[in-house]
Amino acid sequence: MAVAEQQPVATPPQTAEARVPTVIVDDVHIVYKVYGAGTGKGSATAALGRLLLRRGSPNVRRVHAVRGVSFTAYRGEAIGIIGSNGSGKSTILRAIAGLLPPESGRIYTDGQPSLLGVNAALMNDLTGSTNVLLGGLAMGMSQEEVRRRHQGIVDFSGINEKGDFISLPMRTYSSGMAARLRFSIAAAKNHDVLMIDEALATGDRAFQRRSEARIRELRKEAGTVFLVSHNNNSIRDTCDRVVWLEKGELLMDGPTDEVIKAYEKHTK
């Protein structure tokens, strides 16, 4: 009996459009340990003594903030992360940035993730101009790069529209001005992975439009953007994919309109 010759299976050609993963979150669990507040004088000293002696505290509560979350992000994507308060949105960003170690599971990143939040540390006693320099240096820019981009950062933030605030200490800024400057510093650099935590919730509509346009530019420059926001319109305008977390679990991951419609129906 003749045996048919086996033909090699054709391999699809790799194209420039092939998706490149930048972040892989693999079955991640994150647990906080919350120590019960002691009462009376000396409670802090007693707590420190327990830590030094490695004795367990009877008032330790474990909070399972993220429960078995898995997803993969790809270069060029802008991904919104939504969910109710306490759903684990900011926690997962901090874990991707390397600020929180998972109790189990793994997080893999291609390049250096940068986390931008409205609570990002800037020095209140220093001027906005000095903070632009320090923030740029912290992101890996040279002094010359920061000097070249300084005016663009100030103009983007809009904080000088009503006076020369960039030369004043940041303690004189409103919370919205400070948040706009933080975003403007971070957006001045192209990032491998940029994570924005509620940054677009501050500022007027004109600044939000500038921010959304800059995020689209970052995507074109081969970065990956994560945006945590309670503003569904910002998510719709900025992101093409949404991850929905609830009580630390991944409920849905898909196209923006599809996931937001399901979320809004759930929250009504």
Image (spheres, grey):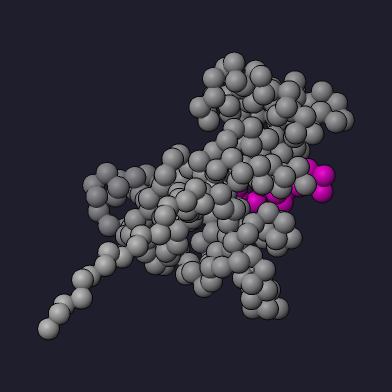
| Image point (66%, 19%), residue name | 148
Q: Where residue 120 sits in the image (x, y, percent)?
A: 58, 39
Q: What stretch is highlighted in magenta?
A: 196-208
Residue 139 screen position, x and y as percent: 53, 30
- In the visual, does 159 lie left or right of 7? right
Q: Where is residue 252 in the image (x, y as percent from the top left)?
A: 53, 71
Residue 23 left/right relative to 216 = left
State the image quarter where residue 144 is shown. Answer: top right
Quadrant in the picture for the C terminus: bottom right
Residue 221 occupies quadrant: top right
Q: Is residue 148 visible?
A: yes
Q: In which quarter of the image is the N terminus?
A: bottom left
Q: Which residue lies furthest to the bottom in this view?
A: 1
User: Nearest the camera: 144 or 59?
Assistant: 144
In which quarter of the view is residue 218 placed?
top right
- Residue at x 15%, y 80% (from the top left corner): 2
The answer to whether residue 25 is above or below residue 258 is above
Q: Which residue lies furthest to the right in this view?
A: 162
Above or below, 146 relative to 218? above
Q: Is residue 56 left or right of residue 108?
A: left
Residue 215 horizontal/vertical position (percent): 65, 45
Task: Please name whichever residue, 20 or 130, is drawn nearer the observer in this view of the structure.
Answer: 20
Residue 203 colored in magenta in the image: yes
Q: Residue furthest front?
A: 2
Query: Is residue 264 shown above or below 180?
Result: below
Residue in view at x 22 percent, y 70 percent: 6
- Asked whether 67 falls inside the magenta stretch, the response is no
Which residue occupies the foreground of this view, 41 or 203? 203
Instruction: Answer yes or no: is residue 115 visible.
Output: no
